[in-house]
Every structure is written in C-alpha cells, then in structure tokens.
Image: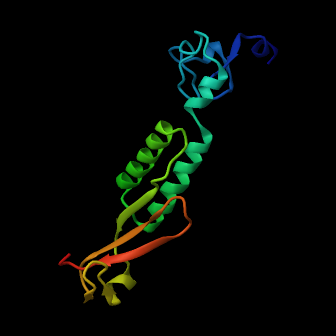
Amino acid sequence: MTSRMHAPHTTCPGCREEVYLDELVKGRCPLCGCSLEEYEDGQEAEELFERFDLSWLVFNYFIFKKFIDMGASPIRIMQLVSAYEEHCVKSLGLHSDTRFKFELPHTIWDRIKPKRCSECGKLFFNGGKKMVSGDLSSPGFSVSYLCPGC
C-alpha cells in the first residue's frame, strides 16, 4: 500500500478526483473520460465551472421534470429551455418573454368529461387537444381544450 501512495498522481480537472497516472486510459480519466492534456494549457478553474454551470443544470432539470410529469413532449421542453437560455445569454439575464404552450395527452378523466373549446366555445366530449400554457416567471399555468374543428 505504501508504494501506491508514492506513485505519480494528479487531480482530474473534470471530476476533481485524484487519479494515478498509471490508471489513465489513453490519456483520459477512467472515472469521467476527461482528457488531461486538454486542461494542461493553462485553463483556470473558473473557466471549467462556467462550462458546467450548476444553477442552469438544476433549473433545466426541474423544468424538464415538471413538464415531463404533465406529459409534454421532451423535444418541445428542450426547445423551450434552450430558447430561454439563448435569450438570457444574449440579453444578460434581462428576459421578459418566458411564456410557453404545450400540447398534453388526455387523461382518463379528460376523455369522459365534457370540455369547452377555448377558441369557439363549443362543448365537446371526444377528440380535440389539451393545451397547457403559462409563464415561467409565474408559478401557475392554465389548461385549455381545443375542439376537433379548431
């Protein structure tokens, strides 16, 4: 065990774990796959953490989880999150348009209850679309229905 302690080792810049040089796989960390040569040319820790911004990851996770639990399309959710992120980066955090609108699948209760179309006001039972809309800057959202004719 003492010979292992004196073996040459380094700290991986990707996962911040201590890695022995004889454990490297083709010059990459065995834990995260990060190339150690990429970071040897003077990158600082601040630049590394800018790439993996924890607050954006947490925000994206909770937005994605909320809409997935509702039944929204994962692609539409990612489009919303990426558009929001791009706009925030461009405007340096001054973002005013955080509205969203998704189509959701009907639940069993939605299939048997009467629904009123938000466009024409007609009452219908079968078919149509269930839409959820709201604003990311406010806590609530609204559910509306569109009849098959609209």
Position of the N terminus, as image quadrant, is top right
Return the residue nearer the eye: 13 or 95.
95
Return the residue nearer the eye: 59 or 11.
59
Image position, residue 53 (x, y; %): 59, 37
Left/right of residue 59 with respect to residue 103 in the rendered view: right
Image position, residue 24 (x, y; %): 58, 17
Residue at the extreme left: 149
Left/right of residue 6 with respect to residue 57 in the rendered view: right
Residue appearing at x 55%, y 30% in the figure: 51
Confirm whether residue 14 shows in the render.
no
Above or below 10: residue 80: below
Above or below 99: residue 124: below
Above or below 49: residue 43: above
Residue appearing at x 57%, y 25% in the figure: 30
Return the residue nearer the eye: 50 or 72.
50
Image position, residue 13 (x, y; %): 63, 22
The quarter of the picture where residue 146 lies is: bottom left
Confirm whether residue 17 shows in the render.
yes
Left/right of residue 14 with respect to residue 141 in the rendered view: right
Residue appearing at x 61%, y 40% in the figure: 54
